[in-house]
Image: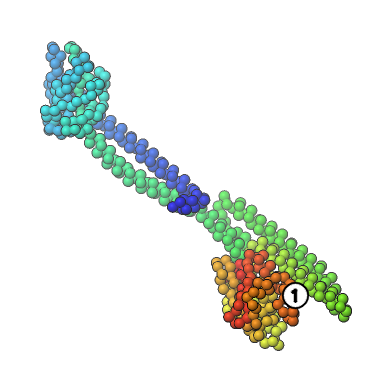
Amino acid sequence: MRATLRGLRHSLRGRMLLGTIAWVLVAVLVAGWALTDLFREHITRQLTAELTVYQNQLIAAMSFDEQGMVSLRSEPSDPRLQLPYSGLYWQIDRLEIRTVREAGVLRSRSLWDQTLHPPADAVAPAGSNQLQTLTDPRGFAVLALMRTVTPPEGSSAYSVIIAVDGNALSEPMSEFSFMLAIFLGLLAFGLAAAAVVQLYVGLRPLAVLRKRLSDVRAGNAGSIEGRFPTELQPLVDEFNAVLLSNNEIVRRARTQAGNLAHAVKTPLSVLANAAARETSPFGSLVSEQVSLATRQVEHHLARARAAAAVRTPGIRTEVLPVLQGLAKVLNRLYAEKGVQLDLDRVEEGWVFRGAQEDLQEMMGNLMENACKWADRQVRISACFSDDDTMQLLVEDDGPGLPEAKLEEIFQRGVRMDERVPGSGLGLAIVRDLANTYGGSVRAEASALGGLRIVLELPGGR
C-alpha cells in the first residue's frame, strides 16, 4: 500500500488524481453536512409551525375567572390529543410569580394521568415561543413548544406547552440522511470516475509523446511525428529541432573524421610502400610500425564513428545483409582452407541500432578470427538477450582456448599464436565498439569444439 502511494506521489497522473479525489471527498462531505443541517432546520421550522397552530388554538380557547384561574372553552380537534400516549400532547402550567411551576393545571387526554416536567428555568418570555426537548411520561424525547401567557388580572401566569414525539424529527432526518448518503456516494463515485477518464484522456498525448520518443531512441524514427495539443507542440518542435541540429553536427564530425583519416592514411601508405622496397631490418621495422599505426588510426576512427552513431537517433542496420556480405568475402578469402560459414540461424528482421560500418567492423573481426582458427565450420547465430538487446554468436570448430585465456584475448596487442597473421587489435576493437554502444563481448567454449564469441548489442527483431 505504501509503495503504491509512493508511486502515485511520483506520478503526474497520480498526483492530479489524488488531488481531485481528495477535493471531491471534501466537497461531498461539506455538501452532506450543509444539506443535512438545512433539512434539519427546515423540518424543525415545519414542526414549529404545526405546533404553533395548536398552541394558538389553546391560547384562543383559554378563559380566566376573577381569581385568574384558567379554563378552556374548547380543545384542539386533532384525534391524537385524545389517544393516550399518541405522541402529541398539550399542557398548561401555572407559574406563581414566574418562579414556582404547578405542572399540568390543564392537559390533554393523550397524557393520561401524567404530566410533562419542563426544567424550572424553562420559562419563555411573554409573547414569544421557546422550543425545548423534554421527556414524555414513557421516557421518550419530545419537542415542546412553550409560550407564557399572562391574564389581564391576577398574579399568576401560565405556560402553554404543545409537544410532539421526537420521532417526528428523527425519522425524516434518518430517511433523508440515508437517501442523501446514497446520492452523494453515487455523485462522488461519478465525479471520481469522470476525473479518472478526464486525466487519462487529457494526459494521453503525453503517453503518445513517450511512445514517439521511444521510437526515436529505438531507431524506428528519426524525429517525433504527428500533431500534439497546443501545450505540447512547441516542445515537440523544439525537440525535433534539437534532433536535426544534432544530426547535422554528427554528420559534420563524421565528415571531418573521414577527412582526417584520408589525410593520415595517405602519408602512411607512402611510408608503407617505401618500406616495402627496403629489404633491410630497418625497412621491416618501418613496415611493421606503419601497419600498426594504420590499425590504430582505423581503430580510433571506428570508435569516433560509433560514438557519433550512438548519439544519432534513428540509425538502424539490417543484420543479415551485413553478415551475408562479410561471408561472401571470407568464403573467397579462405576458399583454399575449405571453411564454410553457416548463417542459417540468423533470420531476416534482426536489426542493430547503430551504424552499418560499426557492425561490419565488429562482425568482420569476429568472423575473420573464427575463419583463421576453424578447421572446416564457422556458425553464426542471432537470439534475444532481453527486450532491447540481441546476441550475435560466432562459433568455430577449431582448437579453442583454455578457460584461463578466454578473457586475455580481448586485451590490446595480445596474440594467442605468433604463427597466425594479425596485429592483436581485432578483438580489442570489437570490445571497444561494443562498449561504446552499451553492449559487451565475451568468449566461451563452443559446442562445435572450438571457441564461441558472444556479442551483445542494442537491437532485436
Relative to 184, is 271 on the left or the right? right
The vertical placement of 398 against 302, above or below, is below
The answer to whether residue 374 is seen in the rendering is yes
Looking at the image, residue 9 lies above or below residue 261: above
378 left or right, relative to 121: right
Asked if residue 138 is positioned above or below residue 24 in the image, the reply reads: above
Residue under the image location 78 percent in, 68 percent down: 261
Q: Position of residue 50 (x, y in %)?
A: 23, 30
- Mark 1, other Cα within 10 Å: few <14 / some 14–19 / many ≥20: some
Residue 346, horizontal then vertical, whole percent: 59, 77
Where residue 457 sits: x, y (%)? 62, 68
Task: Name the amino acid, label 1.
Answer: Ser
Local SS, label 1: loop
Residue position marked by numbered label 1 in the rendering: 423
Quadrant for the C terminus, please: bottom right
* Quarter residue 369 falls in: bottom right
Check the image and tell me how it is coloured: rainbow
Please indicate, yes or no, whether residue 59 appears anywhere in the rendered image. Answer: no
| Nearer to the camera, 51 or 27 | 27
Classify residue 39 by image quadrant.
top left
